[in-house]
Image (cartoon, coloured by chain):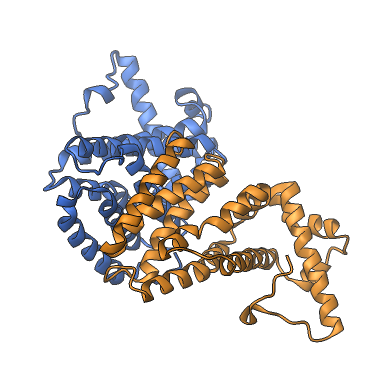
Chain colours: A orange, B blue
Amino acid sequence: MARPKKDDQAEIPTTRREAAKQERRERILEAAQEALRKHGPKGLSMRTLSAQAGLATVTPYKLIGSKAQIVQELLNQMSQTARSQLSAQTFNSPIEKILWLIQPTVEMMRRDPRYVQALTHILFTLGIKPQAHILTSLKSAVWLSVLEEAQAIGLFVPGMTPDAVLLLLVNIFDANGYQWVLGHIDVDQFEARCGFGFTVVLKGIVVAKHWDEVDRSIAAHRRRLDEVGGLSVAP
Amino acid sequence: MARPKKDDQAEIPTTRREAAKQERRERILEAAQEALRKHGPKGLSMRTLSAQAGLATVTPYKLIGSKAQIVQELLNQMSQTARSQLSAQTFNSPIEKILWLIQPTVEMMRRDPRYVQALTHILFTLGIKPQAHILTSLKSAVWLSVLEEAQAIGLFVPGMTPDAVLLLLVNIFDANGYQWVLGHIDVDQFEARCGFGFTVVLKGIVVAKHWDEVDRSIAAHRRRLDEVGGLSVAP
């Protein structure tokens, strides 16, 4: 996973001491992931975390800070991954690119469901209110850049600004993501529901010359929704 | 509020004893509302509740049952209110009727925000998982009947079944409702976001002859979104 980081994201260690510190930070974050995976949302206690990392209890505090800051760092990592995946992809149309936006989350839900579940759970249950904003703003940063690009090439009808479109897509994503975290739907259903929701929303916002492509996409996602039983679970 | 109940919803007390029991049940539910209003989600402890109602601690258990059952009864009340309001309204078009569906919630959020907030909070924090289904199924019952009616008169394009449309509307509603409960947006923003989301979704699902009406509605809701700063808060 040694992808080159973008310049604006890089934190280049300038001295050996910095490099060692950075290495310990990464160990702590890996330990945090593992603790969440193993012990669920409660695994993020500083005690569990330092035990997992084989460090003194105070080290995570010293190097990263509060639990909230660790959560923020973990979310930063996810956002960084999404950004890398996006830049590694090619798309046949701007519509395809927008529909792809849920993929980094879907992949992560499949690969590491317990971790994603625990992390999301923390955002809602530990009373770290600002974290919900952090999650959204990180997601938004990547998503918004794609939507701004789409607006620049004239994809949207007048009045449909990228921030307004973002609201609609994030609504669909959040509602179904929350259902997934609660265990009411599985990843396939999450993916199908988001895809269906995104395509219907796109029909309402793109200029007429893209309607054929969107209509085909709606029909495909509607079929997919039935295949995975996306409507049979109480929404 | 002495609206006649629909036959299929009525629970007609057949004896005096039944009537007295019913009266005490209602007192308990009123006490539950007041306890939630005053003390938040934690107000629903059986102790707080019976104190509030001036009853012995065991009475709520005996008459209604568990905390989960009290929550269910409170949700039933809200659903009943929504149904009454719906049947008391007249609409100029099926589109207007669908856009109206959030109104009972909006009114309740305005009139009794602390109660709605506490009740919703319980659904997510007390681990009463099935309750989230109950909430949705109650909402769905009213909403679905409106969507089935709309389908029957040919409002939707082929493939857009009422259950698929319901999913999209409930997604928009839930995502913004959750933001409201967390205190990230106010009622005006909730209303504007739902209205905007609903109209865009409608554009994607109604047959062409309704597009003019929907387009006007999208434009109006888009302006409203700006008026209330519905996009300025992190979505």
Would residue B53 be visible to someone looking at this image? no
Would residue B88 be visible to someone looking at this image? yes
Q: Quadrant of residue B149?
A: top left
Q: Quadrant of residue B228?
A: bottom left
Viewer-closest of B46 and B232 = B232
Vertical side of B183 occupied by B223: above or below: below
Vertical side of B202 occupied by B55: above or below: above
Horizontal side of residue A47 vs B129, given as left or right = right
Viewer-closest of A143 and B123 = A143
Residue A131, horizontal then vertical, whole percent: 58, 64
Vertical side of A203 occupied by B140: above or below: above
Residue A21, horizontal then vertical, whole percent: 82, 76
Horizontal side of residue A5 vs A230, given as left or right = right
Viewer-closest of B55 and B187 = B187
User: Which residue is rendered at x = 24% and y = 38% of the image?
Assistant: B146
Quadrant of the snapshot with the C terminus of chain B: bottom left
Residue A10, horizontal then vertical, whole percent: 68, 79
Residue extending farthest to the top is B15
User: Which residue is rendered at x = 51% and y = 26% of the image?
Assistant: B61
User: Which residue is rendered at x = 28% and y = 65% of the image?
Assistant: A207
Vertical side of A94 occupied by B151: above or below: above
Q: Quadrant of residue A152?
A: bottom left
Quadrant of the snapshot with the N terminus of chain B: top left
Residue extending farthest to the front is A92
